[in-house]
Image (cartoon, coloured by chain):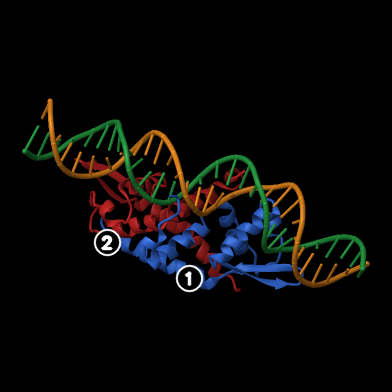
Chain colours: A blue, B red, C green, D orange
DNA sequence: TTTGTATATTGCAATATTACGATAAATAAA
DNA sequence: TTTATTTATCGTAATATTGCAATATACAAA
């Protein structure tokens, strides 16, 4: 085996796991943090911000895009990336449900 | 290569990524959700709740324990698992910082 | 057209994760 | 002590992730 038995779990559980997975690498956390420090959706220079080669950064950006956590739009020669507020809200909601349930517990 | 260049990122970025990673599998999301549905820290039967073999569940539980998201105490023959409120609060705080920053942005 | 700049894709090696059968360890009950 | 029950660990196969050099693509500027 080796492949995750995702079909054995609910859609919501898989969706939540996918979002967590997209953020499960320090480089991708760093990308999100960087996108949050800049005022607008700034183009380029994400590569210069990270201690990784350009193809590696491109790959991490692709994963964040696939998870719909960020989105990129072509802006001349470069690409303008920004956070997908929609998805982050969804994520926040999921997460809230969990932490809310936790507060209702004793333990 | 293949190993993650974690030393190139901040401790906080790595810590956050570790927490996300611990929850990046549907089985582990399911475990957390199950622990939240039961009133107290119920022993055993986590294995029966999941569509996975016992060694696999044990492995997932170990990962959640390593990330300090859950904790287990011996209770006779079985082990009583429950959520580590401390860690989840820390996680919640990290996450809040991100979503708060997002709200301060236009985009 | 040629050159330069920005980003993506390919290919591959190193490493990590996932899953589970077999087995071990620990303890309760008979 | 023997047996049953519960959880952990080992070993291993299948698959996924990470990182980057090389290369491709796309387009702006010269």
Left or right placement of residue B38 versus residue D29 in this view: left
Q: Mark 1 lies on which chain?
A: A
Measuring 28% from the left and 48% from the top, which residue is drawn there? Answer: B81
Estimate the x, y position of residue A44 in percent, counting from the top left: 71, 63
Q: Position of residue B45 (x, y in %)?
A: 24, 52
Q: State which mark lies toward you, 2 or 1.
A: 2
The disc placed on residue B97 is: none
Q: Sort mark 1 into few (<14), some (14-19) or many (20+) by Cα contacts within 10 Å.
A: few
Q: Mark 2 lies on which chain?
A: B
Taking B5 as reference, is B40 left or right? left
Residue tagged 1: A89
Residue A72 placement (x, y as % from top left): 64, 69
Q: Which of B103 and B2 is in front in this view?
A: B2
Q: Which residue lies at the image location 60% right of the left edge and 48% below the top edge?
A: B9
Rate crowding at label 2 as few (under 14), some (14 to 19) or many (20 or more) other CA atoms within 10 Å: few
Marks 2 and 1 sit apart, C-alpha to C-alpha, by 24 Å
Q: Residue B37 carries which label?
A: 2
Q: Is mark 2 on a helix, strand or loop?
A: helix
Answer with the quarter of the image where residue D6 lies: top left
In the image: residue D19, left or right of residue B43 = right
């Amino acid at each position: 085996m080796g492949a995750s038995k995702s079909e054995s779990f609910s859609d919501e559980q898989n969706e939540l796991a996918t979002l967590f997975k997209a953020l499960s690498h320090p480089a991708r956390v760093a990308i999100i943090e960087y996108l949050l420090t800049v005022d607008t959706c700034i183009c380029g220079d994400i590569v210069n911000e990270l201690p990784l080669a350009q193809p590696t950064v491109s790959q991490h950006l692709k994963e964040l895009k696939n998870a719909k956590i960020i989105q990129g739009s072509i802006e001349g020669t470069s690409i303008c990336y920004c956070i997908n507020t929609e998805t982050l809200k969804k994520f926040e909601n999921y997460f809230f449900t969990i932490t809310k349930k936790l507060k209702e517990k004793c333990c």
